[in-house]
Amino acid sequence: MSTVTLDPTSVVATRPASARIWKWFGRYGALLVLGVLVVGTSLLEPTTFATYDNFINILNQSALSAIIAMGLTFALVTGEFDLSIGNVASLSGVVCLSTMVNQDIGIVAALVLAVAIGALVGLVNGLVVTLLNVNALVATLGIGTVAVGVNYAVAGGTPIGLPDPGGFIQLTLGRFLGIPYPVFMMFGLAAILWFILNRTVLGQSMQAVGGNPVAAQLSGIRVDRVRVFAFVICGICAALTGILLASRTGSAAVSGGDSYLLAAFAAAFFGSAVLRDGEFHVLGTLVGVITVSVGFNAIALIGLETYWQYLFQGLLLILGVGVGSLARRRAAAA
Amino acid sequence: MTDATALDDPTVASSPSPTCLEMIGVSKQFGGHQALEDVSITLSPGRVLALCGANGAGKSTLVRILAGAESADTGTIRVHGSEVSIHAPQDATRLGLSFIHQELNLVPKFTALQNMAMGADRTGRGGVLDLRSLRRKALQVQERIGYQVPLDVKVEDLAVSERWMVSLGRSLMRDATIVAMDEPTASFTREEAERLYSIIDELTADGVGIIYISHRLEEVLQVADDVTVLRNGRLVGSFAAADLDIASLTHHIVGREVAQVAHRAGEVDPASGPALLEVRGLTREPRVRDASLTLHRGEILGVAGLVGSGRTELARLLIGADPVGAGTMTLDGAPYRPRSPFEAIKAGVALVPEERRSQGLILRNTVSTNLGMASLREPGNKLGTYSPRRAVRIAREAVARFGIKANSVHETVGELSGGNQQKIVVGKYVLAGPQLLILDEPTVGVDVGARGEIYDIIRDLAAAGTSILMISSDFEELAICDRVVVMREGSIVATVPAARATKDHLTSLCFGTTEQEPS
């Protein structure tokens, strides 16, 4: 048969070098930022920054943000948003501590209960979005606010402290082989979540739903179910971060976890520019969180004032996502 | 103006009366496809010009050029005698041209008045809306068309025909002198259509020129003063409506050429085999009404019909993408009522959708991910794990089997040609192992070579026992079918054996101008 289509190989061969450079930049630009940060700070502060202890410290500082941000990645992968994660983190910490203090239940039971509440909030988010067909921004904003209300009802608005911290604090303070537990949890969870997203039918379906929900539905993917699962994973991760935060501070405040919301979004969006062309993925989010932590650590060690942290985080987000998007456009146009 | 203009000399059409719109020698090419070739139309004030032609004859392209949505390769446009260039929709509006498309482009949450005011609301001083004068103007428009549009009701709460009137009202608010109407009565009742005809009379009495596009030929002959017929992008001729009857108009639309009927060389007639799918009285208002058909094992059944006849909507009902209003379906003898495409695919029924880019593919993903999308859940895979290596192996086999031309299975599908993209969409559903594969316009925007390969895939599937339901506007390609059913206004109106499924015959049936054959 005769074909009138262009031989695709010739198209690729004629693609100019500039396109390839832009493409490379789009994929590895964000990693380049991390590399420059590490090398630059190492040169400036060789004795304090470039040490094994500081390296472990940075990872430990990253862990809580990383867990909540990797969970958020699942909502973003399916094309949804979740604005309730900060509130869920606060709520789970408060529930965990208050049940231990007031109901006198064991650590394990309290942990399970806190995680279950995260899953429940995620489930409700998912059902409101899919069954009631409410926009995810609105739905999760509403459910998040309800979570704040429940939080006040449980805690009465005052921070809860543990009279006998003991075992619960060991959750974040404890070390194995000299490495704090949260670092293991971060990497362990990253491995599990990576597997779910990339090596299961559910994960593939999530990516398909995020890529083109109409095509996914017509391909026999149960789009609504997949979305609900994404919200549940998101809620569970937010709850885990809330528990670890309560453990690290030894107390749980009503709005303790709220600040993680924006940090998680920033990390996930920055991460979408890592290695992939603007797709959200677990590894990218992890790199995003660690990049922010490295920057904060550098700012502290160099002795800059705190406001530099915000300038850095904001600019990093805009640069990472903006340059990635610009690079893709250039690569496509060239 | 009773002189019919001959094909070879379209300029003769200029009559002594002043024209409000002339398009002269318009040509337009899309890729290698000549959508319009040297087409000319003339519209006089106070007259109704009907544009007729089968699907793909070039009517829509002509209107899109006039609306500024496409630009012509060659040709001139004159409005009220002076030559104009229309580069954007705003240009058309400024020239007094107005278009009422089938999708009405109204804001559902706005009231009728707000919708009518859009674009005409520059009357306000300092950006403040002058609501009183807008309402006054809207009332004048109502008076002019002699029809009360409820001005303060949200458009989403109006009936389809009322929405259409709002759209017309908006045109008149902008003082349009030329109004193009695309299939206005497609979802109108008899009475609503009659009301439209009288409004058209009012408008033409006012000197407005109307371009009327409709597949309903009786209606065309009733409403229009002049009729311009297009076929395959060429002008067949312009005629006075008074000189035409349905038979002669059909003849002009269909043409004389004899279609190449190269249907499947019949070994065993699949229509005599066991039935796989039986559809009885399937209804979902307003597009599907009491549709019935039977599809046998290994049979290729074509569905012919004009755009808007309810073919796509029927296909969506068959895969559970839309809820069924009434009617029954049986698949392989058992009741079949899928509530989602997931259930349909589980039952072995898949649809290759009409829009491959928006409905079939994830453009930024790779060939292998797209091919695997409909068969993620393998029956043996209890754990629900996904192996990229296995996906790549299956994709490589599929690429070879379907003749997909890509550098590798890791290439992004957005970068492939239309034909290869289509083969991926078809391949995706074939990999799901359906016993019934529905294809909606499988070769639109596909080059000749890939088209042939897609036909080969379809034939091979049917030979292996898969039943095929093929929806197409390209009646020549329905030659690969064993039987063809014709759909008109939501129902199956005729069944035609392959030997008689010529283009002319099917076109006549689609327009409802030949005697119907009982199925």
Image (cartoon, coloured by chain):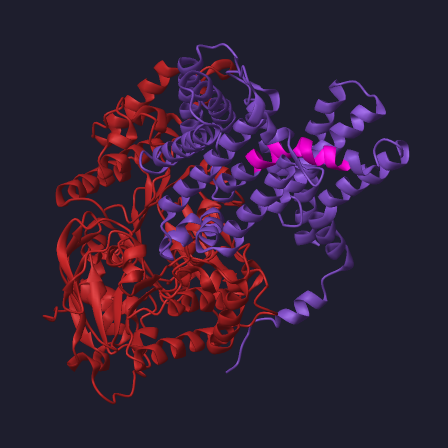
Question: A158 or A111, which is in the foreground?
Answer: A111
In the figure, the red chain has which letter? B
Residue A318 can be seen, yes or no: no
In the figure, the purple chain has which letter? A
Above/below status of A279 relative to B384 = above
Give left or right: position of B439 versus B218.
Answer: right
Question: B103 or A331, which is in the foreground?
Answer: A331
Give left or right: position of B27 versus B259.
Answer: right
Residue drawn at x 44%, y 73% as measured from the top left: B451
Q: So how many labels did they put on this image?
A: 0
Give left or right: position of B370 versus B407.
Answer: left
Question: B325 or A42, which is in the foreground?
Answer: A42
Provide the residue span drawn in magenta: A55-69
Decide whether residue B393 is among the magenta residues: no
Question: B433 or B272, which is in the foreground?
Answer: B433
Above/below status of B470 relative to B220 = below
Q: Where is residue A15, by image quadrant?
A: bottom right
